[in-house]
Structures are given as structure tokens and as C-alpha cells.
Image: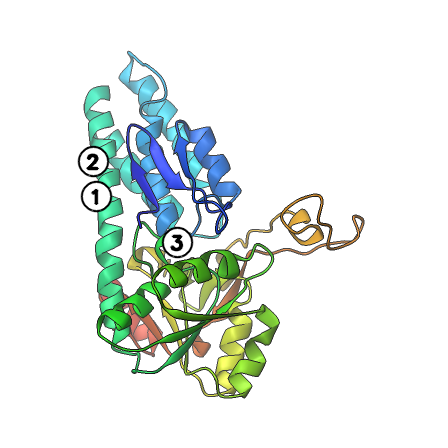
Amino acid sequence: MRTIYWEDCIKMVDQTLLPANLKILEIKNVDELIDAIRRLAIRGAPALEAAGAYGVALATRERDFEDFEKFKDYVKERAELLANARPTAVNLAVGVERVLKRVLESSSIDEARKIALKEAEEIAEEDITRNKLMGGFGAKLIEDGDTILTICNTGSLATVEWGTALGVIRSARLEGKEVRVFACETRPLNQGSRLTTWELLQDGIDVTLITDSMAGIVMQKGMIDKVIVGADRIVRDAVFNKIGTYSLAVLAKEHGIPFFVAAPLTTFDWTRSMKDVVIEERSADELRYCFCKECRTAPEEVKVYNPAFDPTPLKYVTALITEKGVVFPPYEREVPKILKLK
């Protein structure tokens, strides 16, 4: 299933309505796209990269211009707003910057519009290709009969198509391996229960839903063979991913369970460290209510701390699965090789 694509505008699955309703949104301007990103109608680092790319293409078509310099200034302004729609995931800005660069290198408005859309389409297709490559490399780490624990959603809905961590599981199935999955619900917005279980059931993959706080007991009981998660940003000392990932990594270490991270190279931000990254804090109402104002889960006046992501130190990560291969420690030596920084 394709999560985001272009048909005279940006079309995307509205992930806030799943699993009850599969609806395709039509995004016709950058403001609508920013709103969709902030309310998580589209989410997942690779999908946000494609959204950012398509968003710049959309910005080139929002208004009519005769002056090329004014056109470029307008697109730059819109691109900056879009790139900052969510601060923690690096891929959004990567997609925006790549297409914006091509726009600014163009020689006319017509050329800029054509090149922007072409570049955005290439980014989307590249995402599909690299996720399948990543899946193939990661599948080699999975044994027939493995039970895998995951958090949040890292499948087709988090990418353009196929998935990162779930893509690894899909690829293992294509190799004929029987795989079972335990999916953490992923509070407070339940991307695991709403999205991951829906995707896996669609694929006919054995999936069991648990609350986030049950991860420890299923590991303690020997029910988990491996943990595979995605990532929103990988810096030189940590992996930033959905809140709760750090807890899973510590638990996996305690129980001797391999902990893998599947992410494309565009998610690596190797010049930065954990302290440099801003962790997005979301609305308190995500914890005070359960999806609607009619379902209150906490007193209105209670203080709330609601970070969307947490950093997992790389010392807890068994290996990083990328489209260029599997990277094992020591990461300070091996990651620059695969990123071609040395």
C-alpha cells in the first residue's frame, strides 16, 4: 500500500482515522500539509521525507509569479515553515532541502515546477527501493520461528511503501520464515494498536497486541526473541525514536535479547549528539483525553509531560539495519564508513 503520492496534489492516507476508516486526504497547499503533519495524519520519518519533498513541489504551484526572484523567495519561506513542522525527525528537513536546492538551481519558474515534482517523485521511489533493500539485509538476522517485539508503526504507513522495522519482518516472511510479532500499543496515540496491528493483519502475519507496560513481562517469560524498532534520528551517541523505545532497549539488554534499529541513511545525523536534538513535546490533551473530548482519562487541571520521542544510547543497540547493510559496533568507526564520511 502506498502511503503518499502525487495526483495533481498530494494524496495521503489519513492515519488518524485508522483502523476504523481508510480515507485518502487531498492536500492542496503547504498550510494543509503542515496541519496534516502536526496532527499526525502523516507520520514516520521516511514518509515525512517524501511529504517534505512533495510539499516543496506544492509550494512552487501555490501562487502565480512573473518575477523569478520573488518566486524563489516565496518557495524558500514556505519550505522553511514546512521543514520546522516537527523538530525531532530529521527526514522531513532532508526531503525539503533536497527539493528546494533543485528549485533554487533552476533557471525559470516553469523549470522549477517541473524539476521540483520530478525530484519529489524520485525521493518517493528511492524510499521504496531502500526499504526493500533494508528488509533484505535485516531478514538475514531473523530466524525461522522468531517472535519479534516492536513499538509504534514502522510499516508502509511510516514510509512511502513497505516499511523499515516492519519491512524487515515482511522480507523475512518472503524468505519463507515464520515470524510472530508482539506490538506495543504505543501510548498516548496508539500507533502500535491502531496502525501496526492493522498492517500486520492485512498481511496475514501473526500479531499479538500488548500495552507498553507489558513489555517487561513478555521478555521475562522468554516470549521474545528479538526487538526491532525504527528511528526518527540517529546521532553519534543515540537513536531517537518513539517514546518508550529506550525502556525496551534497557529491558532487552537485561534479558539478553538482541535489539535492532532499522532506518535509512537519511535518518542519520552523525554530526550531532544526543544533547543537540530538540525532543518534540506534544499537547497535554493527548494524555488528558483518549482521542476525543467525550473520553476524559485524567483531570483537566493535572500537569502533563508528553515528549513524543526518547533517546536510546547506542550502547544498547545490537546493530543498525540500513539499505547499505547491517552495521555492528563499534559505531564510531563503522557508521562513518557506511555514510562515506571517511
- What kind of residue is marked 1? Glu
Instruction: Tell me which residue sits at (29%, 82%) in the image.
Output: 144
Could you tell me how far apart the alpha carbons at marks 2 and 3 are, in whole angstroms? Answer: 22 Å
Q: Is residue 321 above or below residue 21?
A: below
Whether residue 92 is visible, yes or no, is: yes
Whether residue 342 is visible, yes or no, is: no
Task: Please state the horizontal and vertical placement of residue 63, each as a whole percent of the image.
Answer: 36, 17
| Contact check, label 2 and label 1, Cβ < 8 Å | yes
Task: Please tell me whether mark 2 sits on a helix, a strand or a loop.
Answer: helix
Q: Which mark is residue 118?
A: 2
| Mark closer to the observer (1, 3) | 3
Q: Is residue 340 above or below residue 249?
A: above
Could you tell me how far apart the alpha carbons at marks 1 and 3 are, in whole angstroms? Answer: 18 Å
Tell me the quadrant of the picture where the C terminus can be found. Answer: bottom left
- What kind of residue is marked 3? Ala
| Contact check, label 1 and label 3, Cβ < 8 Å | no
309 relative to 61 in the view: left or right: right
Give the residue pinned by disc 1.
Answer: 122
Task: Please state the horizontal and vertical placement of residue 172, each as a whole percent of the image.
Answer: 27, 72
Q: Which mark is residue 158?
A: 3
Q: Tell me which numbered mark, 1 or 3, is placed earlier along the sequence.
A: 1
Task: Please state the horizontal and vertical placement of residue 335, each as a whole percent of the image.
Answer: 30, 69
Q: Which mark is residue 77?
A: none
Task: Please tell me whether mark 1 sits on a helix, a strand or a loop.
Answer: helix
Task: State the residue in front, 282 or 151.
Answer: 151
Task: Please state the horizontal and vertical placement of residue 10, each as a whole percent of the image.
Answer: 34, 34
Q: Tell me which numbered mark, 2 or 3, is placed earlier along the sequence.
A: 2
Task: State the residue in front, 129 or 241.
Answer: 129
